[in-house]
Image (tube, rainbow, N blue to C red):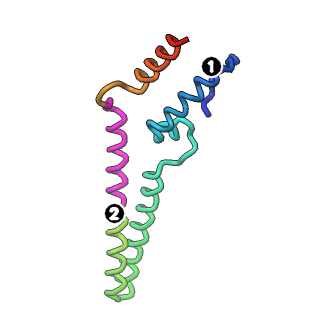
Amino acid sequence: MFYCGAMALSEHEKRLLDQMEAALLTEDPKLATTLSGTKMPIARNRSLLAIALLALGLATIFGGLIAKVTFIGVIGFLVALTGLILLISSVGAVAKAAKSRRSPRKGFSLSDRLEKRWDERNSDQ
Protein backbone atom coordinates (compact mmCIF):
# COMPACT_ATOMS: atom_id res chain seq x y z
CA MET A 1 0.00 0.00 0.00
CA PHE A 2 2.68 2.52 0.98
CA TYR A 3 6.09 2.97 -0.63
CA CYS A 4 8.91 1.89 1.68
CA GLY A 5 11.99 3.01 -0.21
CA ALA A 6 14.69 1.30 -2.22
CA MET A 7 15.96 -1.01 0.53
CA ALA A 8 14.53 -4.52 0.62
CA LEU A 9 12.68 -5.57 3.76
CA SER A 10 12.98 -8.86 5.56
CA GLU A 11 9.92 -11.07 5.95
CA HIS A 12 9.59 -10.05 9.58
CA GLU A 13 9.70 -6.35 8.68
CA LYS A 14 7.13 -6.88 5.92
CA ARG A 15 4.79 -8.57 8.39
CA LEU A 16 5.24 -5.73 10.89
CA LEU A 17 4.57 -3.18 8.18
CA ASP A 18 1.42 -5.03 7.13
CA GLN A 19 0.27 -5.09 10.76
CA MET A 20 0.91 -1.36 11.11
CA GLU A 21 -1.01 -0.67 7.88
CA ALA A 22 -3.93 -2.77 9.11
CA ALA A 23 -3.89 -0.92 12.43
CA LEU A 24 -3.84 2.41 10.60
CA LEU A 25 -6.78 1.34 8.42
CA THR A 26 -8.83 0.36 11.47
CA GLU A 27 -7.88 3.39 13.59
CA ASP A 28 -8.03 6.14 10.99
CA PRO A 29 -9.40 5.09 7.59
CA LYS A 30 -9.58 8.71 6.39
CA LEU A 31 -5.85 9.16 6.93
CA ALA A 32 -5.10 5.88 5.21
CA THR A 33 -7.10 6.86 2.11
CA THR A 34 -5.50 10.29 2.13
CA LEU A 35 -2.02 8.78 2.27
CA SER A 36 -2.80 6.30 -0.47
CA GLY A 37 -4.22 9.07 -2.65
CA THR A 38 -6.98 6.92 -4.13
CA LYS A 39 -10.02 9.01 -3.25
CA MET A 40 -11.02 12.48 -4.48
CA PRO A 41 -12.25 14.67 -1.63
CA ILE A 42 -16.04 14.70 -1.37
CA ALA A 43 -16.15 18.37 -0.38
CA ARG A 44 -14.57 19.33 -3.70
CA ASN A 45 -17.25 17.42 -5.63
CA ARG A 46 -19.95 19.05 -3.52
CA SER A 47 -18.46 22.49 -4.19
CA LEU A 48 -18.49 21.91 -7.94
CA LEU A 49 -22.10 20.69 -7.79
CA ALA A 50 -23.09 23.71 -5.69
CA ILE A 51 -21.50 26.16 -8.13
CA ALA A 52 -23.26 24.46 -11.03
CA LEU A 53 -26.63 24.62 -9.24
CA LEU A 54 -26.07 28.27 -8.37
CA ALA A 55 -25.27 29.15 -11.99
CA LEU A 56 -28.23 27.15 -13.27
CA GLY A 57 -30.54 28.83 -10.77
CA LEU A 58 -29.36 32.31 -11.72
CA ALA A 59 -29.78 31.52 -15.42
CA THR A 60 -33.30 30.25 -14.73
CA ILE A 61 -34.15 33.41 -12.75
CA PHE A 62 -33.04 35.61 -15.64
CA GLY A 63 -34.88 33.36 -18.09
CA GLY A 64 -38.05 33.78 -16.06
CA LEU A 65 -37.58 37.55 -15.97
CA ILE A 66 -37.07 37.73 -19.73
CA ALA A 67 -40.08 35.51 -20.44
CA LYS A 68 -42.10 37.36 -17.75
CA VAL A 69 -43.14 34.03 -16.18
CA THR A 70 -43.07 34.27 -12.38
CA PHE A 71 -43.23 30.52 -11.84
CA ILE A 72 -39.93 29.94 -13.71
CA GLY A 73 -38.29 32.71 -11.68
CA VAL A 74 -39.41 31.08 -8.42
CA ILE A 75 -38.04 27.71 -9.52
CA GLY A 76 -34.76 29.39 -10.49
CA PHE A 77 -34.62 31.07 -7.09
CA LEU A 78 -35.10 27.75 -5.31
CA VAL A 79 -32.40 26.06 -7.41
CA ALA A 80 -29.98 28.95 -6.77
CA LEU A 81 -30.79 28.89 -3.05
CA THR A 82 -30.13 25.14 -2.92
CA GLY A 83 -26.79 25.67 -4.66
CA LEU A 84 -25.85 28.45 -2.26
CA ILE A 85 -26.72 26.38 0.81
CA LEU A 86 -24.76 23.43 -0.56
CA LEU A 87 -21.78 25.67 -1.30
CA ILE A 88 -21.77 27.14 2.20
CA SER A 89 -22.03 23.70 3.80
CA SER A 90 -19.20 22.27 1.67
CA VAL A 91 -16.94 25.24 2.44
CA GLY A 92 -17.75 24.76 6.13
CA ALA A 93 -16.89 21.05 5.88
CA VAL A 94 -13.52 21.86 4.28
CA ALA A 95 -12.77 24.44 6.98
CA LYS A 96 -13.78 21.99 9.71
CA ALA A 97 -11.57 19.26 8.24
CA ALA A 98 -8.61 21.63 7.97
CA LYS A 99 -9.11 22.76 11.56
CA SER A 100 -9.31 19.19 12.86
CA ARG A 101 -6.08 18.31 11.00
CA ARG A 102 -4.25 21.19 12.64
CA SER A 103 -5.33 20.51 16.21
CA PRO A 104 -3.84 17.37 17.76
CA ARG A 105 -6.15 14.76 19.18
CA LYS A 106 -6.41 14.27 22.90
CA GLY A 107 -4.12 11.62 24.27
CA PHE A 108 -1.30 10.06 22.31
CA SER A 109 -0.78 10.78 18.65
CA LEU A 110 -0.77 8.02 16.06
CA SER A 111 3.01 8.10 15.75
CA ASP A 112 3.38 7.79 19.54
CA ARG A 113 1.08 4.76 19.62
CA LEU A 114 2.87 3.10 16.68
CA GLU A 115 6.24 3.74 18.29
CA LYS A 116 4.99 2.25 21.56
CA ARG A 117 3.72 -0.85 19.74
CA TRP A 118 7.02 -1.16 17.87
CA ASP A 119 8.95 -1.00 21.15
CA GLU A 120 6.65 -3.60 22.73
CA ARG A 121 7.11 -5.99 19.79
CA ASN A 122 10.87 -5.58 19.83
CA SER A 123 11.04 -6.13 23.59
CA ASP A 124 9.07 -9.42 23.25
CA GLN A 125 11.66 -10.95 20.91
Under mark 2, the amino acid is Leu
SS for tag 2?
A: helix
Q: Along the line of sight, which residue is nearer the eye, 35 or 89?
A: 35
Residue at 68% across / 20% down in the picture? 11
**In the picture, which quadrant includes the C terminus?**
top right
Residue 58 image point, x, y percent: 38, 71
Q: Is residue 3 toward the left or the right of residue 101 in the image?
A: right
- Mark nearer the viewer, 2 or 1: 1
Magenta stretch?
85-105
Q: Report the disc number at residue 84.
A: 2
Give the crowd class for mark 1: few <14, some 14-19, many >=20 residues within 10 Å: few
Marker disc for residue 13: 1
Q: Please name the residue shown 45% across and 18% down the image.
A: 115
Image-quadrant location for residue 80: bottom left
Nearer to us in this view, 90 or 72: 90
Q: Position of residue 106 (x, y in %)?
A: 29, 30
- CB atoms of marks 2 and 1 within 8 Å: no
Q: Position of residue 59 (x, y in %)?
A: 41, 74
| Amino acid type indicated by mark 1 | Glu
Residue ranking furthest to the front? 124
Instruction: Tell me if residue 101 is in the magenta stretch.
Output: yes
Q: Is residue 21 left or right of residue 89?
A: right
Q: What residue lies at 65% left-to-right and 21% top-to-bottom?
A: 5
Query: CA separation, marks 2 and 1?
Result: 51 Å
Q: Main secondary structure of the magenta part?
A: helix
Task: Say if 82 sits above or below 30 in the image.
Answer: below
For the N terminus, the quadrant is: top right
Quarter assignment of residue 85: bottom left
> Dot 2: within a 10 Å radius of its alpha carbon, few (fewer than 14), some, or many (20 or more) residues?
many
Q: Is 10 above or below relative to 38?
A: above
| For marks 2 and 1 on the same chain, the one whose residue lies earlier in the sequence | 1
